[in-house]
Image (cartoon, rainbow, N blue to C red):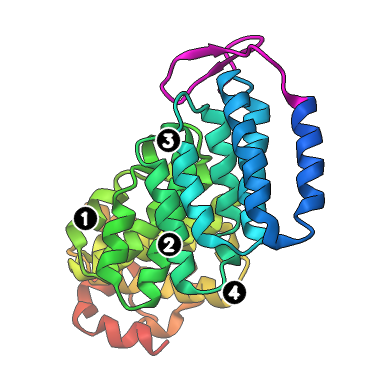
Amino acid sequence: IFTQGKGIIMGANDRLVKMEIDYSSVVDQKLKECDEIMKDTIKLIEVLDRLLPLEKQTRTAADTISTGRVLVAIIKYCYQAKQWEQMNEHIVTLSKRRSQLKQAITKMVQEAYELVEKTPDLDTKLKLIETLRTVTTGKIFVENERARLTKKLADIYESQGKTKEAAEILQELQVETYGTMDRREKLKFLLEQMRLCLAKHDYIRTQIISKKINIKAFEDESSYDLKLKYYELRIQMDLHDKNYFDACQHYKHYYDTPRIKQDEEKMKQSLKYVVLYLALSPYNNEQSGVWQEVESAANEVVPACLPTQNHAFYEFPQMFRKDIVLLVETC
């Protein structure tokens, strides 16, 4: 991502920088020495005293790979010594170094991100998350890592009963604009934003977020689980707005998913709700067309809902709209 040509890399200030010296062999030797020293973890300061000058050398020479290795090693050694405060301090300091290299920062952030779940307690975890969120602010090249950190923070807030705070912090992310995040991960973030907005009864915001999702993304079989979650959330919105026809259509999308069709119990249950909310919808040509579409399947799955065998299925909603809820739910 950051390489512009042979020996040319991008600095954190968005300027092209040419590598002047290859420090890979020097770094190899230094890291071997540091590994030996760190067998006694109380010697962390000695190790850092060796690595920090080396970081400056590799950075000023624009050796991005070697700089990244040194930054990762500093984080790793702080973890081995269980010096979380020092780790946080060095993450901030190293990311602010003059002409720091993007790829090196990325490697350091990724290394520290992997340690979030290895923190000894919640307070330490929160401090590390906030440190990483601070150094990734405004840096597009680590926007994916920042998004994942924000999701972890939102999860913590929600577990503490702070649903409003969780929703607000996750809404800061505009993941639909992220160029390097894969489609599935984007969908998961957007669905999580919808879920949290619904949890705090912010239906307007939920509607706005839902429009960012292209439902064509659900056509791929690998996205069926996300498709089902999406329509579950949309149905919650529909029922809040008493928009029964939309609820019917969204249940039908749910019902039409191959994964649901393969599960007889789920298939019957979802079709019952298609019938229920279709019957509650105002009668018009569009509603009538859907009745015709689901008639044969509904006759097989929910025959007990029909008033008598003398009435056609499409006459049912017009005749029994008031009692349809009880009829369908008792099938």
* Mark 1, other Cα within 10 Å: few <14 / some 14–19 / many ≥20: some
The boundaries of the magenta stretch are 1-24
Q: Are marks 2 and 4 in contact (CB under 8 Å)?
A: no
- Residue at numbered disc 3: 96
- What kind of residue is marked 3? Lys
Horizontally, residue 193 falls left or right of residue 110, namely left
* Mark 2, other Cα within 10 Å: few <14 / some 14–19 / many ≥20: some
Mark 1 lies on a secondary structure that is helix
- Residue at numbered disc 2: 127
- CA gap between label 2 and label 1 equals 29 Å
Mark 3 lies on a secondary structure that is loop
Q: Are marks 3 and 2 in contact (CB under 8 Å)?
A: no
Q: Which mark is residue 264?
A: 4
Q: Nearer the viewer, mark 1 or mark 4?
A: 1
Q: Residue at x 23, y 85 (%)?
A: 323
The numbered mark, 3 or 1, whose residue comes first in the sequence reads 3
The numbered mark, 2 or 1, whose residue comes first in the sequence reads 2
- What kind of residue is marked 4? Glu
Instruction: Look at the picture and state if 6 lies above or below 193.
Output: above
- Residue at numbered disc 1: 205
The numbered mark, 3 or 2, whose residue comes first in the sequence reads 3
- CA gap between label 2 and label 4 equals 48 Å
